[in-house]
Amino acid sequence: MILHDLLGYDTLRIIWWLLLGIVLVGFALTDGFDLGAGILLPFTGRNDIERRVVINSVGPVWEGNQVWLVLGGGAIFAAWPQLYAVSFSGFYLALFVVLTALILRPVAFKFRSKRDDPGWRARWDWVLFYSGLVPSLIFGVAIGNVLQGVPFRFTPDMHILYEGSFIGLLNPFALLCGMVSVVMLVMHAAGWLVFKTDGAVAERARMFGMLAALLTVALYALAGVLLLTVVNGYRITSVVDVLGPSNPMLKTAEVRAGAWFANYAAHPWTLIAPAAGFAGAIGALLALMARRGGLALFCSGLGIAGIILSVGASMFPFIMPSSIDPRASLMVWDSSSSHMTLFIMLVTTGIFLPIVLAYTSWVYHVLWGKVDEDAIREERGHAY
Amino acid sequence: MDLDIVALSRLQFGATALYHFLFVPLTIGLSVLLAIMETVYVMTGRVIWRDITKFWGTLFGINFAMGVATGVVMEFQFGMNWSYYSHYVGDVFGAPLAIEALMAFFLEATFVGLFFFGWDKLSKVGHLVTTYAVAMGTNLSALWILIANGWMQNPVGAVFNAKTMRMEVSDFYEILTNTVAQAKFVHTVSAGYACASIFVLGVSAWYLLKNRHVELAKRSMTVAASFGLAASLSVVLLGDESGYQSSEHQKMKLAAIEAMWETHPAPAPFTVFGFPDQEARETHYAVHIPMVMGLIGTRSLNTVIPGIDELVKRAEARIAQGLKAYAALQQIREAGSTTSVTQGVRDAFELNGPDMGYALLLKRYVDDPRQATPEQIRQAAWDTVPQVAPLFWTFRLMVGIGMFLILLTLTFFVLSARRRLDRHAWLLKLAVFAIPLPWIAAEAGWMVAEFGRQPWIIEGVLPTAVAVSNLGATTLLITLLGFIALYTLLLVIELKLMFRAIRNGPHDEHPPMVGDVLRGFGRNPSRPFASGS
């Protein structure tokens, strides 16, 4: 097979770096609102019917949304195997905690309304809260650690040695990033609930959403300031072969203060990403004030996309720096899959992602409209 | 401590995989049965078929949730517990997993919501299309995960790259058309169909015994018996063994399943019964049937099936070649590139490269395989023999159940054709008690396939012991116990809800079915009928 030579290895690596961003944004925009709805569940629904309104607003779609996370895992495995190996084994206990949430979540959705017992339902409601909060928080914490560099090195055989601890992951800057993640998804979920529900639920969601949008702006700005002043970035110090083999040990790199802002200085157009982050969150705040759910959802989506992409823009070409051996840092040019695998996966994605987007849109279209409280009260048309 | 980590990692993966596999076969099979039942509804317009679809759909939903919950863990675990594996083969193994998400998971997960929420929002045909999409998604996911698993058993279409220290794709088409993957797909999917059929058959039999929901039960049984007969014939006749000749370790697995310590002249006899003894390398009290093994294993009369002794000798030779490749690789890596070493080293690497995994078997005994003693090499060669007794027994358990399920479904097929489903109470009881059997067979099948692959994680390429993450034993123990506790709790709740849903029968469904209202079972007659009635 020589077809893969149609696209250069460097081009494919850039495309897959962008696709990684797109998949993460896709996950945050879709699964984000149902994770956020889980966090808001105990606070926006004060009685059983109201809670079921919240649950049923995401009920038919959350399963499809979560596939973005599964796709993210698969895409990282297939296109960035070293990133997959280092991050999943390094963040081991953190991911175990995420998994407890992801194991309980489908079950909570499915089981909660199968019995009338209020105690049973209340327990599962808290499970939905936990399983919304924990992944939102920990994925943010993980990004916070990646920005600071992660303590790993390679043996000569390329075995990964991770020298950090679970508690070490929970450092102040990482927790701040975790908070950014939580409040931005809560903001997004609030837009969704205002869009999909009416009455008391929508009104409460609106209040929490405005608060979350304000916090998103404040905490995101604070994280930026810390990144400029306290948290160091990384810089490549050798010549890089963008067509070279995927072996991180062939370059050298160093820790450098403020290095995460070098790309913005060199390519000012990349400032679009953080600008969209702020503009989206402010837009969501204004839209929620005006009770415009659809607009709020759009703006929060824009904000989330901007915030996630700004992490990528800051770090490029780094994907996962190593704090104890900067040479081992994973970057776009030296931790991807082979030329052929990247090409095959790109063709597959090019065919199937549009199909996925098409039928997903159709499903959302079928489910268009507000969740009907009366229908839930009368046990019609809602599965949960 | 090293061995502890490997053992704990294997235990964790085995436990989570076996647990996940409690839900997968039913999901695969029941989704297809739902599609068949709903097709009958759409074609005949008879409301009872809609009730039937909805009722089994409820049970499908409870099971599906558990499948999703345990499935995510599987994907994460490769990276978490098997990071060297992920690095070493991610270029090859990651692709089918990513494609599985793109092609299959999105399809099933996006439409499964609409299956439950869409009865009033879609036309009859629209909803039928939704059900078909779910069924297609679950079956496609089986295809892709088995392409990935098939590659672990028979790693075709990939080569080792010294610059990146990993396996990379050389021919993706070969990976897709891997004979082992194809055999596994047909076998596993058929097993899922059989499992769901027995489930539907058994639950319906229980209703007939209790004289409840008789119309629903009889119709369900008719579908389940015919579909189940076809499926159990397929699962036994198109068994996995068809792939067992395609690679060296697959042959070893076959020899271990048969406890064939020595090579027999073709066609080899089949050992029906016996007590395999790994230490003595013989099977006590063995009962043989002449020729049958040769026929099953090779589908021919004159192909010799190598025995364990011969395969171990071959493994020893491959270790010797693998050591040459390993030594050459070290020279290449020290020199920095293939161009800066002598032609002799390059040739040694090229020639022996495919056997390099065999040298890694020695890592259990020495850090540098080049320092291994002849005794260690002999030991490593014997390590390529999996535990014979568990394979011998799980295989026989699986096949025995398979045979029984053919008889059972055939019986009910005949009864249903002669409209005598409710005549023989003892047969109905038998069907109820048969419900767990396909699960036992499926778990046994997993043991044969995966336990039988040991000591390899990727056959001939990477030993399991080398593939683990560098984690502490305590960390592993915490997560192992955590998963087991969580899974056990959920399994108990799941079974309770399943039993409740079955006991309550089709009439406790939310929303109530049109058929119920028409028959006067509805709780609120003034409630407007759902559309499509």
Image (spheres, grey):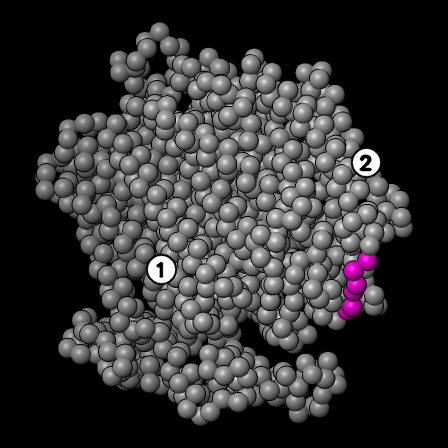
Q: Which secondary structure type mostly characterizes the magenta part of the structure? A: strand
* Chain containing the residue with disc 1: B
Q: Name the residue rendered at 60%, 16% in the picture.
A: A203
* Range of residues picked out in magenta: A251-256
Residue A100 x, y percent position in the rendering: 47, 45
Q: Is residue A320 above or below residue B55?
A: below
Q: Which residue is mark 1?
A: B446
Q: Name the residue rendered at 69%, 83% in the picture.
A: B334
Indicate left or right for A140 with B397 as reference. right
Task: Give the residue type that dot 1 points to.
Answer: Trp
Q: Quadrant of residue B448?
A: bottom left
Q: In front: mark 2 or mark 1?
A: 2
Indicate left or right for A254 with B204 as reference. right
Q: Residue furthest top?
A: B526
Give the spatial CA distance, label 2 vs label 1.
Answer: 52 Å
Task: Give the residue type that dot 2 points to.
Answer: Ala
Residue B306 x, y percent position in the rendering: 34, 81
Quadrant housing the C terminus of chain B? top left
Magenta stretch containing residue B175, yes or no? no
